Amino acid sequence: MANSVSGDSVVDRVVRVIEAFPEGADALQLSELAERAGLPLSTAHRLVRQLAGHGLLELGAGGHVRLGLRFWELVNRNSPTLALRQAAMPFMEDIQQVLKQNVNLGVLEGWEVLFVERLSRPGSVVNRARVAGRMPLHISSAGMALMAYQPRGLQADYLEQFDDPEGKVTADVVRHRLAEAVQLGYAQLAGVVDPETWGIAVPVLDAKKRAVAALGVVVPLAEVRLQALVPALQTAARGIGRQLGDVRGFRSTESV
Amino acid sequence: MANSVSGDSVVDRVVRVIEAFPEGADALQLSELAERAGLPLSTAHRLVRQLAGHGLLELGAGGHVRLGLRFWELVNRNSPTLALRQAAMPFMEDIQQVLKQNVNLGVLEGWEVLFVERLSRPGSVVNRARVAGRMPLHISSAGMALMAYQPRGLQADYLEQFDDPEGKVTADVVRHRLAEAVQLGYAQLAGVVDPETWGIAVPVLDAKKRAVAALGVVVPLAEVRLQALVPALQTAARGIGRQLGDVRGFRSTESV
């Protein structure tokens, strides 16, 4: 394996090129890509040309570089989210039709929630949960629903390292919210991300009653009717969990 | 760049590892992965460990390897399909609600249609168009809608190389279908993929009247009412096209 002076391998540098692309659909100038990847321009250029030769990147006019459709295809045709998304989509559509609001599905990744699917409608309220976007657990109802149904050891680790960069929330407040979510069976956060919206999420549980995903909605504060929302979400989440139980190769059932 | 005896570079070998994962959610045994990638076991093992160190692959118990959630995230948070999917989703949901059938969205990749999004409902008819799945153009109404609205040169290249492996369709038949699709404004294929279904698709056109995508439905033969289906699809496709026109960074508007 060829290592550069700095000791990183070709694989490391390829990963840095891929990681350099920001959230959104923007292409990067080659020089910008090299800078974001922390690579000399000549190295970045060589890697980009090689990856473009396989269709993993696309080199446009004017030196623009973007991730290639072939790359998207390779990582989506066999993806850890495929089984989860396929199980969840019909239920998410049901929820969306009944509630006429944004519905999202998130999984735990480190101390963040990673949103793997989202359905939104024109005219529905703002929902910052983008597909393949992340949010800190403590400002997302989906994040709270996920963490509330994790093993105690993991929760303890989370709370121990917890530090709100905005200084608004303490670990004790988060601990209280997690306990409340377990007691109620759902997590709720009113006006945290956007002052006009309420996030409500329920866990999708596996056979060990661990949350493998969270199903959430974001609704305008004025329209919240928990009596209607929560049973609908819980019913859908149970349906998704049952569906997943039948799926061979689903992540949570194999990764123990 | 370190090249192996066979002359391929580390980048080539990394790409072969990624390409080795088949369609579906299945993990691979390390030995199977090495074989599919055409790499010595020791090389495959080293690459897998390096990629797993970055979260791009996940090494499970028993030597199972799968694509990592981090990989999915990186390629989906900045993806050539993001703008298209975001523009299309609300319209696809409208179509799905009105027709209660599978709706899919495909783009042209080589001489195949690559499906970038799909909505299906429990109880809806079989639809082989998987997300990130491909189909030959000539057996898919979405494929025909895409090719019908391409520049003449590209169409000529396609027809020249055309060869139906099943020997059922000739280039002349395909040429006729393409002309018909342009005349009608939509492509239709009855009972080609499944004997019980009818595929109908319309192009999503850019400012140059080139198809950047195709929006299609798959409905049971007995339920087809073209008078209702086609205008609904065409209206939705125009909406998607208009939406895309406003999106900076959309593929088709930059890649010329």
Image (spheres, coloured by chain):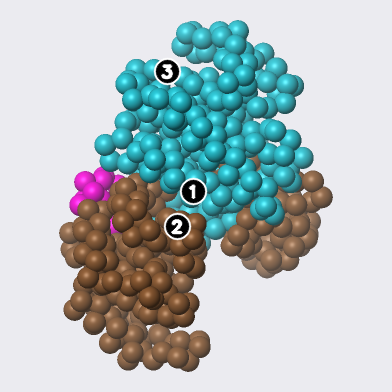
Chain colours: A cyan, B brown
Label 2 neighbourhood size at 10 Å, few (<14), some (14-19), many (20+)?
Answer: many
A71 sits left or right of B97 in the view: right
Q: Nearer the viewer, residue B188 or B67?
A: B188
Total numbered circles: 3
Identify the subunit bearing mark 1. A
- Identify the magenta region: B242-252
Give the number of the disc on residue A89: 1
Q: Is residue A64 visible?
A: no
Amino acid type, mark 2:
Ser
Most foreground residue, B9 or A71: A71
For the residues labelled 3 and 2, the Cα–Cα distance comes to: 32 Å
Residue B120: which disc? Answer: 2
Asked if badges 3 and 2 are on one and the same chain, I answer: no
The residue tagged with tag 2: helix, strand or loop? loop
Label 3: which secondary element: strand
The residue depicted at 28 percent of the width and 87 percent of the height is B176
Q: Read off the chain for label 2.
A: B
Is B244 contained in the magenta span?
yes
Say the numbered circle drawn on residue A190. Answer: 3
Proximity of marks 3 and 2: CB atoms separated by less than 8 Å: no
- Tags 2 and 1 in contact by the CB under 8 Å rule? yes
User: Does the rendering let one see residue A249?
Assistant: yes
Residue type at the position of mark 3? Ala
Q: Secondary structure at mark 1?
A: helix
Q: CA distance from mark 2 to mark 1?
A: 8 Å
At 23% across and 49% down in the image, what residue appears?
A: B243
